[in-house]
Amino acid sequence: MFRSTRLIAGAALLAVAGVGAAAETTKKVGPALKSAGTLAFGPDNVLFVADSESRMIYALETGDTKPAGNAVTKVEKLDEQIASALGIAADQLIIKDLKVNPATGRVFISAARGKGADAAPVIVKIGDDGKPAELDLKKAAYSSVQIGEATDKKTVSVTGMAFVKGSLVLSGVTSQEWDSSLQTIAYPFTAGNKGSGVEIFHGAHGKYETKAPIYAFAAFDIAGQSHLLASYQCTPLVKISLSDVKPGEKVKGLTVAELGNRNKPLDIVVYTQDGKEFALLANSTRGVMKVALAGIDKAEEIKTRINDKAGLTYSTIKELEGTQQLDKVGADKVAVLRKVGTNLNLEIIALP
């Protein structure tokens, strides 16, 4: 049996932190973000924000401490409402990630105001009335840690983050021989560290790979031990023990399912329902899957070519078609950002 902790999601690449990477251990005010991408919540309502352009992870104090008192279950045309609050046209808004503060139930979104060289990072909180409001970064207290060596000028992006038992877990890809990487950074930050190379068997390709990035992962426990349930392009589902993730070393993930090729995972949560464990996985072309996780602790590795599907079974949740982002709200609900026709709506619904 296992229990869910936190998840992350994202869609980019990561150059992981090197030994001795700088950290701002003393809290300051007014982080100078150049971009805002993948999000994750930590202790004391801290919101971790991946800034790929600055090659930094910021830990922001949100000030979001009181439980939400709203009954809002749906916000229609959320992108248009956010754009209006920011004073821009809807086509000048790029939504990057969505996370729910587990302590309050409020939704936070990372985005870009504008496009190209003129784009500016924003963090938006959805109020109890369903109205979006920009977080005033100039007044936000923060600490930070650098990802990537100071001399490395390559673009850095993060595919996923989760706070797991005192550490921030990051996923992505490096420019080293082992491209796909994971790393853990203790919080409060003291310094970064070197990531672990990740190898998996990719059933659709029929071979072991080290370059494919993790596009979405959720953290969960098996017999009290922390693991990741990671999803890759085309779509291997992989179990990784966090105890095997050690700086500078290599870790092998165990492929427990192949969920179909020509598909990109977008986001994932793990939850318990009626005493059984499931993963809810949003995808680019194969809809939202409810994956049964029974027996994952004893699942055998898939290590032969798979033409379509194998391993853990799933059902497709047709009612959630168009989902782009999702995160749990408490133990039995989920916040879903999904396209319905031309509208991008936020819905708070029961876990299926």
Image (cartoon, grey):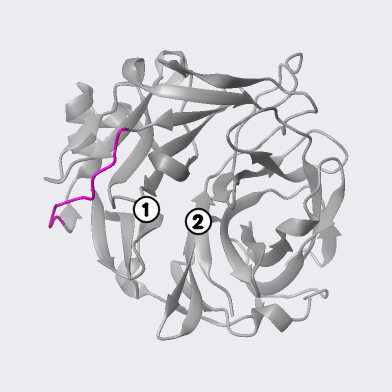
The residue under the point 56% across, 24% down is 144
Residue 32 pos. (x, y %): 46, 14
The residue under the point 73% across, 67% down is 204
Amino acid at pointer 1: Pro
Q: Is residue 308 toward the left or the right of residue 69 in the image? A: right
Res 19 → quadrant: top right
Q: Is residue 255 toward the left or the right of residue 124 in the image? A: right
Q: What residue would you read off at disc 1?
A: 102
The answer to whether residue 300 is above or below residue 148 is below
In the image, the segment drawn in magenta is 63-72
Q: Are marks 2 and 1 in contact (CB under 8 Å)?
A: yes
The residue under the point 51% across, 49% down is 9
Res 222 → quadrant: bottom right
Q: Is residue 102 visible?
A: yes
User: 10 Å neighbourhood of mark 2: few (<14), some, or many (≥20)?
Assistant: many
Residue 352 pos. (x, y %): 35, 76
Q: Is residue 69 magenta?
A: yes
- Dominant secondary structure (helix, strand or loop) of the stretch shown in magenta: loop
Q: Nearer the viewer, residue 210 or 133?
A: 133
- Counting residues from the start of the chain, the first of labels 2 and 1 encountered is 2
Q: In what quadrant of the picture does the N terminus appear?
A: bottom right
Q: Nearer the viewer, residue 307 or 255?
A: 255
Amino acid at pointer 2: Arg
